[in-house]
Image: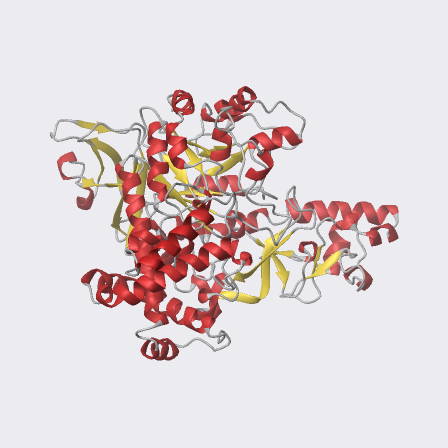
Amino acid sequence: MERSEKLLRVLTTRLAPGLAVAVCGSAPELGSWQPSKALRMNRVGIPLWSVGVSRSLPADTEFKFIIVGTGDDSVIWEEGANRTLGQPGPLEFRGGARWRAAGTAVPVFSLRSNDDFGCGDFEDLRMLVDWAAATGQQVIQILPVNDTTMTRTRSDSYPYSAISSFALHPLYLRPRLLGLPSDRNTRRRFERLRLRLNAEPAVDYPAVVAAKEEYARIIYKEQGTGELQSREFADFMAANASWLMPYCAFSVLRDHGRLGEPYSPGLVMQLALENADGNFMFYAWLQYHLHRQLLGACRYARSRGVAVKGDIPIGVSASGVDAWQYPELFNLDASAGAPPDAFAADGQNWGFPTYNWERMAQDGFAWWRSRLEHMAQYFDAYRIDHILGFFRIWEIPVGVSSGLLGHFAPALPLGPGEMLARYGFRFEPWMAVGSDNCPTDLLFVEDPYAKGCYHPRIGGFDAPCFARLDAAMQQSYRVMHEDFFYRRHDDFWRHSALKKLPALVNATPMLACAEDLGMIPACVPGVLDEVRVLALEVQRMPKQYGVELADPESYGWMNVATTSTHDMAPLRLWLEQTGRDSSPSACEEYVRAHVDSPAMLAVLPLQDWLSVDAAMRNPDAASEQINVPANPDHYWRYRMHLTLERLMEGEELRSNIASMTSCR
C-alpha cells in the first residue's frame, strides 16, 4: 500500500537554540498562510527537517518553509517563489548559507579500542563520535552492519552479502554489556581470549564471531529467561515480528543444516514452539541486545550533533532470509554484478539475485520501504550502494562466472533486422557462441527475456573473434556498441529509475546519498537532482571524459566529496603507487581541497584523515586498504593501527582537522 502521507524534507543552515522549521501554505493543514498555525517539522540528527502532509491535498497546494521562534513575530520566510506539493523543489531552505559538513568514513569492524573483543563494535561509535565532534566533524559513515553469518568462516566477512536486510551482525556486539558470566574461571578465560584477539593487527573474523557467540550463549542461559519476560523485550518482538521470526527460524535451520526447507508461516511457528527455550529465542534475544547497543550509540551521536550515515547494500544473499521468505521478489536464476571498470577488468559477479521490480511495484515497493524505515531508527543519512542498479542492473546468468557475459536489465536488445537497418551490421549465429575454452570469445549475448534478440558483449571488440569481421563490419560493430551502451537506453533507464526512487527516497526522513560510480548513463545526474539524492564525487574517478583528476572546487552542493572509498587504495597508498609525493603535507593538500569544496558533505576515510599527521599515520600504508574488488574472495579484516583512546589523545591532529573543518 502507498503511504497515506507525503514526506516533505528541507535542509537548513545551523539554527540557534529555540528555532525550528515549519511548513506554511495555502491549505488549512499548512496554516492557511498564518505562521502561528503552520505545520511544525521534526529535526533529524543533521539540520534536516521533515514532516508528513496528507496525500489528499491537491498537487497545486502552495507553501513555503519558514523558520519560527518562540514569538509569533520572529518568522523567517524562505526566499523565492512559492513551492507546490507537486513540485516541492530543491532540498535546501532558500536563503542564507548552505549547510556543509565534514565527516569520517570507517567500517565498524575497523575500529579499535582498549575494551574491544577483537574487532570494532557498536559501543566504539561513541568514542568515534567524541573525536568527530572535537574535530568539527558532523558525520560518521559506516559500512553495512547486517548479519552475514552463513558458514561462520572468513567468507562471511563480506559485509555486502547479508543473510537478512534487517538483522544486525553479532560481530558488532559488546559482550560485557550483556553482563558477566557467573563462573570466575569462565570470566578469566574470556578475558585472556579478549586480550589476545584485540592485540591482533587485523580482525580474526571466525575467532571473534565464535567467541562472541559463545559468550552470548552463556549469558543467555544464565539471564535470558528473565529478559524474555520483560516489557521491553515484548515490545521489541511485537515491533519486529515480520522479519525477526523468519530470521530466527532461518538461523535455526542453518545451524541444523536444513536450509533446503521451503518457507511458510507454519514452519516458522513450528520452529518457534520446538525451540522456545533454545536457539530460536536466543537469536531474538541477541537481536534485541544488538538493537539496543546500536540505537544507544546513534542516539548518543545525535546528542553530540553528529549524524550517523548507514549503508544500504544493493543486493541480498540468494540463500538468505529475504529470498527465502519472499522468493517472488527476486530473480533467483540471475546474479547481479558490474561491467568491467577500473576495479575489475573482467567485470564483477556479486552472486546476488536481481530484483523482480514489476512484482515489487505491485505493493508500492513495500519490502524496500520497510527495509529503509527499519534502518531509519538508527541512521540520519544513508549511502545507496550502487544506485545505478535502480536504473539498470548488470545481470549475469546463474552458473556463469565472468562479468563479461552479463547484460543490462532492463534493456532494449537488438534483433538482427534492426542491426542491419540501423547500423548496417549483418548478424550471424556464430557471433553469439563462445567456445568451452574461451566462453567470452563472442560478440553478442542473447537476451534471456526476448529470444532471438541480443546485446553486444561489453567490450566485444576486444574478443579474439572480432578479428573475423572485415573492416567495414568492425566499424559498424563499434558504432553499434557505442550507441547501445551510451545512448540507446538513456530515456528508457530514466523512466525505469523514476518508477522506483521517489517512493524509496521519500519513505524516510533520512538524507539519501548515492554511490554512482562506474559506467554512468547520461540520465543519472538529472534523475538524482530531481529526486534530491546527493551524488558521489571521487577525485581520482572523475565523471568528465578525458580528465585524470577532478577538481573538488568544481563540485556542486548536492554532492558527497571524498578522497577514496573502501573499494580503492586509500589516499597515501594511491600516492605511493602512482609515484606521487605521499608526505603528510602532500596528503593534507588533497584533504584540504576536499574539505574546502562546495560539496554539502566532505566525508573522508579515517585512513586519509590520519595520513596528514606523521605521528598518527599508519607505518604500513598497504595494510590500510579495506577491499580489493577484483578479488571475490577478499578477506574484509582491516583494523585501525592505533586505538580510539590514542586517537583522542592526538592533540595536534585534532587541532589540525578542526582548523580545516572550520570553513564548513
**x, y (%) of residue 330?**
51, 65
The part of the image, by quadrant, that contains residue 395 is bottom right
**Residue under the point 45% across and 26% down:** 595
- In-front residue for pair 539/474: 539
In screen coordinates, is 606 left or right of 645?
right
Image quadrant containing the C terminus: top left
In screen coordinates, is 163 left or right of 456?
left
Residue 409 in view here: no
**x, y (%) of residue 490?**
58, 46
Q: Give the total of numbered labels.
A: 0
Image quadrant containing the N terminus: bottom left
- In-front residue for pair 121/491: 121
Residue that protrudes farthest toward the left in the picture = 71
In screen coordinates, is 507 left or right of 466?
left
User: Is residue 326 shown above or below 47?
Assistant: below
**x, y (%) of residue 495?**
51, 51
**x, y (%) of residue 661?**
40, 24
- In-front residue for pair 497/534: 534
Residue 455 in view here: yes
User: Is residue 258 shown above or below 291?
Assistant: below
